[in-house]
Amino acid sequence: MSILIKNIKGLVQVRDTSVSTVRGADMKQLPVIDNAYLLIEDGKISSYGAMTEAPDRAGEVIDASGRYVLPCWCDSHTHIIYAGSREGEFVDKINGLSYEEIAKRGGGIVNSAKRLQITDEDTLFESAWARLSEMEAFGTGAVEIKSGYGLSYDGEIKMLRVIRRLKEKSKLTLKATFLGAHAYPTEFKQDHEGYIDLLINKMLPHIAGEGLADYIDVFCDRGFFSADETSRILDAGAKHGLRPKIHANELDYSGGIETGVKYNALSVDHLEYTGDEQIAALMASGTMPTLLPSTAFFLGLHEPPARRMIDAGLPVALASDYNPGSSPSGNMQFILSLACIKLKMMPEEAFNAATINSAYAMGVEQQLGSITAGKKANIFITKPMPSLTYMPYSFANNMVEQVIIS
Ligand code: NIG
Ligand code: FE
């Protein structure tokens, strides 16, 4: 089974030899072949190049005149398994309450946990499936999905089982992350030890034993899990072979970035509170700084210092953080727009951040994230566009016309 895409206006993010990340000044380099072809065979990228060298083939042929072709987005941080929605808190925020104040009143993550508890697995599966389809239509081809609204043994396992079912049914590339340490559930608010014990000694062994998670996450921030608590949980995760991807420094200088680096996290995410020391720690690591600009936008947080990070030589990834409380959208095109508008990233930097760097941040950079022979053919064709920059410029519109997964 082959597909030849011909007359492509620009074939974007072409890397003849696979790179695992793009960092610093190199993030402004986005390799494009003008007037190109792309041949897909057996679900993989088989060859590509200038139209003058296009093969003469039978099989399906798509004419992409006036259109760009890109590798699909890799969305390396989402919470798309959830029950209900939280637009009541949206109004609370308009009325001036902060994310932390809402959480203290029993809203926030704990509110979603209550709803998840009374929702069955099939219902959770169906709603997450619909979200995945919607994300795919905006060009996403790989998604990391977290647990973290269970906050109990049964609830966390239920969420991870749903992710397993999504992996079995979906053609998208999916990764599962155990985020039991997303918040202290109400009954353990005064008993952190009790919850950490449950997490380490009961949830983790079962989850690791059943192979339900690829990664482990902790919300390391003021009012949630301290750096010490985070260390203990990551230690236990490491014993079960789970590499961390953690929520860090969203609400304060929480020590989360340093803790993530210390435990060789694949990524540390959010990073609104990042100074020179944190940048220095990240520079000496293999940890991908991942920015979630829709969360800062939705909650009205101050922006993470993307420019300073990139100018210091760091790589940066982008993800949607799709969740009911702080980012109720998985539209990665809008994430790129926000990265450009709010974080002052150049369009080329945003494209690198949402493809190859976010592939690295979810451990799939060998298979996805660039146009490279042998990689999975998760690609999208845009609508006709005057330039590539038109895509982030044209914010909140869907410029993707067709998505091809494998
Ligand atoms: O990444 N920061 C922590 N967790 C989520 C929010 C989850 C929620 O509010 O439901 C986030 O923004
Ligand atoms: Fe998150």
Image (cartoon, grey):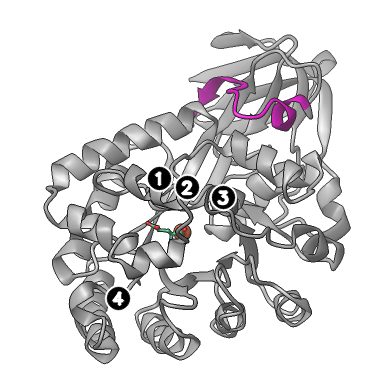
State the mark number for residue 91: 1
> Closer to the observer: label 3 or label 2?
2
Sequence-first tag of 1 and 3? 1
Mark 3 crowd level (few <14, some 14–19, many ≥20, 10 Å Cα): many
Q: Is mark 2 within 8 Å of ligand 1?
A: no
Residue 378 in view of the camera: yes
Residue 148 in view of the camera: no
**Residue in the image at 74% along x and 29% along y:** 393
Spatial distance from mark 3 to mark 2, Cα to Cα? Answer: 25 Å
Q: Is mark 1 within 8 Å of ligand 1?
A: no
Question: Quick one: SS at disc 4?
Answer: loop
State the mark number for residue 94: 2
Spatial distance from mark 3 to mark 4, Cα to Cα? Answer: 25 Å
Q: Is mark 4 within 8 Å of ligand 1?
A: no
Question: Quick one: SS at disc 3?
Answer: loop
Q: Are marks 1 and 3 in contact (CB under 8 Å)?
A: no
Spatial distance from mark 1 to mark 3, Cα to Cα? Answer: 25 Å
Q: Are marks 2 and 1 in contact (CB under 8 Å)?
A: yes
> Closer to the observer: label 4 or label 2?
2
Residue located beneath label 4 in the image: 184
Name the image quarter holding residue 287: bottom right
Q: Position of residue 357 (x, y in %)?
A: 66, 54
Measured along the vertical axis of the image, is residue 172 above or below residue 366?
Answer: above
Question: Quick one: SS at disc 1?
Answer: helix
Q: Amino acid at mark 4?
A: Tyr
> Closer to the observer: label 1 or label 4?
1
